[in-house]
Every structure is written in C-alpha cells, then in structure tokens.
Image (spheres, helix red, strand yellow):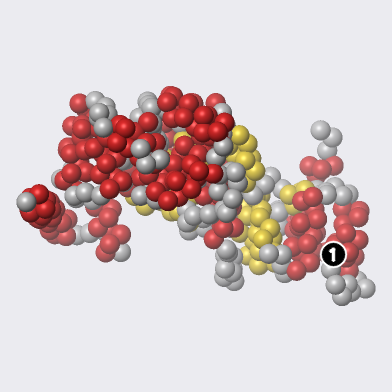
C-alpha cells in the first residue's frame, strides 16, 4: 500500500511527476525569495487548451534580477545544469536543469518574441498574475491573456502554425482585444504577427528577417544574420557575432553521452565553417 | 487523533486511484495505493479523523471487521513518516 520510489522502483506517470516537480520548483523559489511564473504545459488555463498537454518538462519564467539567486538555490537542491543560457538555444533565453527525482526544468529569463526590456516585461506579466494550485502548493501563472500571448509566441517559434491558428480562432473578441493590447505593451508585434499568419505586415521591423527565417526556415548563416540585425543594441549584436562561430560544447556532450575531448571540440570547430560554406553554396545555387 | 493534515513541505497528486505524495523540494515520492490512497484523499478534503474510518469504509468494497484499526494504524504510519501532521490542525488559527 505504501511504496517509496527510492526503495522499490515504481513508475510515476509523467503528468504526475511534472506537477510534483512544479511544486518542488515553487518551494525552491519561495525559499530563495525568487519571483517565478509557471508557464506552458499543465500551467495553461483550460480556456486556452481544453486538452491539457503536460509536456515533458517544467517551464518557468523568472524575474531577471532573481535568476542568480534561483540558479544557486536550484543547484543547492540537486538540480544540475543540463544546458546553459549561452548554449541552450540561439535566443539565449532559457537554461535547462535536470533532477534525478523531478526530470527537466527550463528556466526562462525572458521569452523569445517579447522585445520589451526583460525586467519590464516580467513586471507586466507579474502584475496580472493569478494563483495556480499545483499539487497542493500555491504558485503563480500569468493572466489568461498573457498565457495566450506566450503560447502564440511559442507556437510561432516552434513552427506550430496550426496550433497558433487554432488558439487564435478559439478566443472571443474581448480576449483578442486583451491579447493585442498586451502584445503592444510587450513589444511583441512581430512574433505575434508571425504566429497569426500576418508577418508580412511587419516587413519594416528590425526583427522581421529573424521571424521570417524562424517561421519559414533558412540556413544557419541566414538565421545568424537575421539575429544580428534584430539585436536591439550594438553591444548585443557584437555578442551574437562572437557566439556564432563557437562550438556548442554542451550539444557535443549530449551527443556523445560524455564530456567531449579537446580533439572532438577542435574537429567540431572546423566542421562548422564547412557546414556554413555548404549552406552558402546551396543558397547560391538556389538563387540561380 | 482528531484533526490531521498533510505536513509542511509535502506536495501530492491523486491520479487513477493512487496518491503520489512527495517531500519538496528534494523528494522522494511516496506512492499510496488501495486503502492508503483513499485515506489520503479523504484527509485532504476533510481533516476530521474521528469520522475517517467510516468515510474510508464507505468508499471501499469488502470492508474487513478490523477496518477501523487498519485505518488508525495506517494514519499513525503516515504521521510517523512525517507525511501527515496532527498538531497543525489542532492549533487555533
């Protein structure tokens, strides 16, 4: 009748494990004094996704100023960094952790598509937060309209245009008005347009090429060019350029199932220009 | 044994007649099945331990004659494990 999973092994359903994981992460955040919003997966309101998709990991958005303290607290409670902000995604928006008991956690310090200052954007979402009961623990989620914005931007980035279209069709006029208003406050017009199939209305925007590449596909070189053009400051653009030719050491480690050797890193470093050159040549041929 | 609640730092989910009870933030997860899951479910909705055995028996089939003693024993076990807490419910707000 009573089984401890650290003794005899018992299969825990993924959906159950993720809800308990959210409660565990909330406890860590509370202890660290870090503000977090639970996003995506089973934190989504049933108005937006009647069929709950638990996902495969826990996603949270944290106040940017609290990233350091939350990171330290997570590590202290057994969460190991799986991929860093730098190498986790080209946006540099999330850091992934893994825990032997809870599985995977994506800690977002901003959300791709939101071009407003990250601290101000978080405050906008935080000010409209709702209480969400998770496995007997109280956490916070964005308001329903803000959840819709996050889902739409996420669908755009993940090229799930059908999901975005279905969500946009499902919401009423009042909700659409709230969503558009929030999109304006978050300066997320370009990604929102990409999500709702209206990207061409944003042709003059600096981030248009980036979302064009993201939603329609393109070479790695084209994506990096678009990313540099979309960077709001020269300093950030310089950082993106500096990162472009680097080898993603974490990706190599996950690929090999162990830390890569120095030789493997060197081989990967020289393989990247070859890949880029091949894409460049393919691009030239395609233009003919 | 009058009022019993979950202990601080405990999260729980009930799914398909099973109670998954976890110490947070670090685990482990304890799995309760059968009458133990029903006991947990009942206590999470009503902390009154004086009526617990009757409520649990009402939800079970083939209730044994010593059901009351079994429920009491299981609750004492959950208290000893630190998953339930008797003192909090007995304290005035």
Task: Count residues near mark 1 (Cα–Cα under 10 Å), then give few for <14, some for 14-19, many for 20+.
Answer: few
Q: Nearer the viewer, residue B93 or A151?
A: A151
Image quarter for residue A185?
A: top left
Q: Is residue A254 left or right of residue B38?
A: left
Q: Is residue A139 left or right of residue B6?
A: left
Q: Is residue A156 left or right of residue A207?
A: right
Which residue is rendered at x = 59% and y = 58% of the image? A16
User: Against A201, is A24 above or below?
Assistant: below
Q: Is residue A209 visible?
A: yes
- Residue A217 point in image, percent of width and height: 25, 49
Which residue is rendered at x = 38% and y = 27% of the image? A187
Q: Is residue A105 visible?
A: no
Which residue is rendered at x = 51% and y = 33% of the image? A176
Q: Nearer the viewer, residue B75 or B13?
A: B13
Q: Where does the N terminus of chain A fall, quadrant-wise?
A: bottom right
Residue designated by label 1 = B59
- Residue A44 point in image, percent of width and height: 55, 45
Which residue is rendered at x = 81% and y = 33% of the image? B93
- Residue A193 point in image, percent of width and height: 37, 36
């Amino acid at each position: 009748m009573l089984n401890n999973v650290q003794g005899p092994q018992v299969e825990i359903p993924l959906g159950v494990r993720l809800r308990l994981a959210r409660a565990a992460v909330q406890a860590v955040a509370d202890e660290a004094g870090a503000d977090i919003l639970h996003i995506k997966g089973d934190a989504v309101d049933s108005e937006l996704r009647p069929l709950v998709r638990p996902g495969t990991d826990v996603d949270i958005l944290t106040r940017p100023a609290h990233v350091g303290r939350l990171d330290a607290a997570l590590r202290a409670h057994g969460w190991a960094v799986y991929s860093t902000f730098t190498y986790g995604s080209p946006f540099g928006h999330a850091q992934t952790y893994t825990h032997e008991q809870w599985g995977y956690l994506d800690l977002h310090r901003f959300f791709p598509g939101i071009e407003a200052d990250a601290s101000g954007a978080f405050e906008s979402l935080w000010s409209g937060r709702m209480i969400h009961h998770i496995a007997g623990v109280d956490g916070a989620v964005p308001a329903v309209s803000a959840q819709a914005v996050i889902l739409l931007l996420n669908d755009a980035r993940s090229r799930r245009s059908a999901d975005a279209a279905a969500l946009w069709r499902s919401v009423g006029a009042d909700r659409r008005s709230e969503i558009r208003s929030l999109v304006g406050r978050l300066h997320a017009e370009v990604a929102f347009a990409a999500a709702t199939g209206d990207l061409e209305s944003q042709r003059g925007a600096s981030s248009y090429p980036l979302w064009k590449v993201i939603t329609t596909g393109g070479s790695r070189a084209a994506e990096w060019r678009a990313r540099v053009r979309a960077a709001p400051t020269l300093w950030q653009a310089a950082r993106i350029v500096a990162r472009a030719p680097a080898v993603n050491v974490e990706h190599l480690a996950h690929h090999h199932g162990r830390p890569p050797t120095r030789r493997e890193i060197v081989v990967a470093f020289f393989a990247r220009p070859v890949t880029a050159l091949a894409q460049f040549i393919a691009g030239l041929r395609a233009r003919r | 044994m009058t009022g019993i609640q979950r202990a601080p730092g405990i999260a729980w989910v009930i799914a398909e007649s099973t109670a998954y009870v976890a110490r947070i933030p670090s685990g482990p997860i304890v799995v309760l099945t059968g009458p133990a899951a029903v006991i947990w479910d009942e206590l999470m909705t009503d902390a009154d331990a004086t009526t617990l055995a009757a409520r649990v028996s009402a939800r079970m089939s083939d209730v044994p004659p010593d059901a009351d003693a079994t429920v009491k024993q299981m609750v004492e076990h959950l208290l000893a494990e630190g998953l339930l807490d008797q003192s909090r419910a007995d304290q005035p707000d």
